[in-house]
Amino acid sequence: MLVEPQGVRANSWEDVADLSVQAGITLDGWQELILRAAMGERSDATWAAKRVGISVPRQNGKSQLLVARALAGVLLFGERKIVISAHQQDTAREAFGKMVEILEADGNGWLMDRVRPNGIMNAINREAVKFKNGATVQFKARTGAGGRGFSSDCLLLDEAQRLKRAAWVSINSTMSAMPNPQVWLLGTPPTREDDGEVFESIRTAAIGKVSTAAAWAEWGADPNADDYDPASELTRWRGNPAWNTRINHEIVQGEFESYTPEEFAQDRLGIWLSDLGDGGTRAISVDQWKNTFVKSPPDGVKSFGVAFSPDGSRVSLAGGVGHGEGNVHVELIDATTKRGGLAPLADWLCEKDDNGKPRWRRAGGDIVIGGAAGAGVLRQLLLERRVNAKRIRVVSTPQYLQACAMFADSIEARTATHLESEGQQMLDASIAVVDKDKRGGWMATTPDGDETPVEAVSLALYGARTTKRKQSGMPGDERKKAVIL
């Protein structure tokens, strides 16, 4: 599987490959494929891929790829600080040893000439290589370090399946001031014991096309293939790009005989839990979401859901149609920033038809609002427009959490449906990156993700399920897109 970023105007991957050959680093075809996806530049000479994710089983050559990218940053791209990081110092030190081995190899005197005198720092937990051009490559462990020392032009995160969210947030904060940063995340599919939320969110955003500035490369066997057989060499070859060059087949057979089927599938065959039929850390799996697609909405009483982000900068509007026996159809109407205030949203909800009947009254249900940052203001705007106060429901925190749980349960039970259409792309993108927080509410698991579309449909479903109004036919087409500027 390969996902490439958008907006590429030039590509430096061949320069990296040529430098690697000159340094005695023989790159495999799969490693060159990653470089081709990762090293594209936009017209302004910045990296098209701000994040590069790689999921590949162990011992296929990730460390070699890390060193090749680091050397290219030093010698080709003018990057002043490069950090190679791993969950534990032992793994980071392994990458350090690989770089020193290349620098000191026979025939690489031209490389050593570029290293400062005494520039190879071999002290435990302080491993680094300093070059005469002022560039430094550091090798750091993340355990206990938070985000300290990770500000760099290029950050290469090994063992990304163990990257904790707190560390990721801190690292992103330190990288935000860099003019043209690139972050690589390399790992294997997270196990049930790993804290794999970040790695999975990067994968989900890339595969779901939520991020246009990400590259993602993944090697793994297909557990749904007709000829899938963990005991066969064909299946093992499909999951390991270096099967015929670096992998010891006898060691793999020992893994097969001693690992559980799930352990072998993840660790050696590169299969993610979600692809093994387990939703992993996602609150709503891809299959669950696809299984609740419908082509057209049913008739019924429509309620509206409005969700604000915690800082009030984003707002989403959704509709929910209750049509008996606890079944609810939901649609996202709009999701946007709150530029221009909330008056356009209030105006849309109160827009009148030819008979002078406002939309909120024609819908027949309630307007359910969540989010302290904007709920009070919207409620006041609606009251000023003579909306019946009994139709406006500003939910409490317990009610919001109930709405989130109700929506997740309804998707799992298939008592909630949603449209399969291009107009619902923002909702699909939100579903792809949300998970439950510690309270049970929705949260985005990527830096550029937006949880408010899922919150809005949750509130709309909650309104439709808990309204006391009669669920009868709803006249007219109430699926007009809102204009919230």
Image: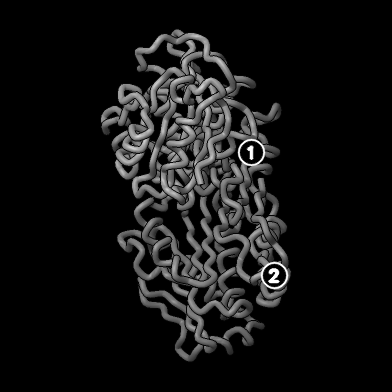
Please name whichever residue, 347 or 48, is drawn nearer the observer in this view of the structure.
347
Q: Residue at the location (35% across, 71% down)?
A: 125
Image coordinates for residue 117, horizontal then vertical, percent: 48, 91
Circle number at residue 12: 2
Identify which amino acid the numbered label 1 is placed on. Ala
Mark 2 or 1, nearer chain start: 2
Describe the element under mark 1 as helix, strand or loop: loop
Circle number at residue 124: none
> Could you tell me which quadrant the N terminus lies in?
top right
Q: Is residue 328 above or below residue 169?
A: above
Q: Residues within 10 Å of mark 1 (few under 14, many from 20)?
A: many
**Residue bearing the label numbered 1:** 221
Pair 2/1: label in front: 2
Image coordinates for residue 130, horizontal then vertical, percent: 48, 83
Please name whichever residue, 263 or 135, is drawn nearer the observer in this view of the structure.
135
Which residue is at the far front?
Answer: 355
Q: Is residue 285 above or below residue 296?
A: below
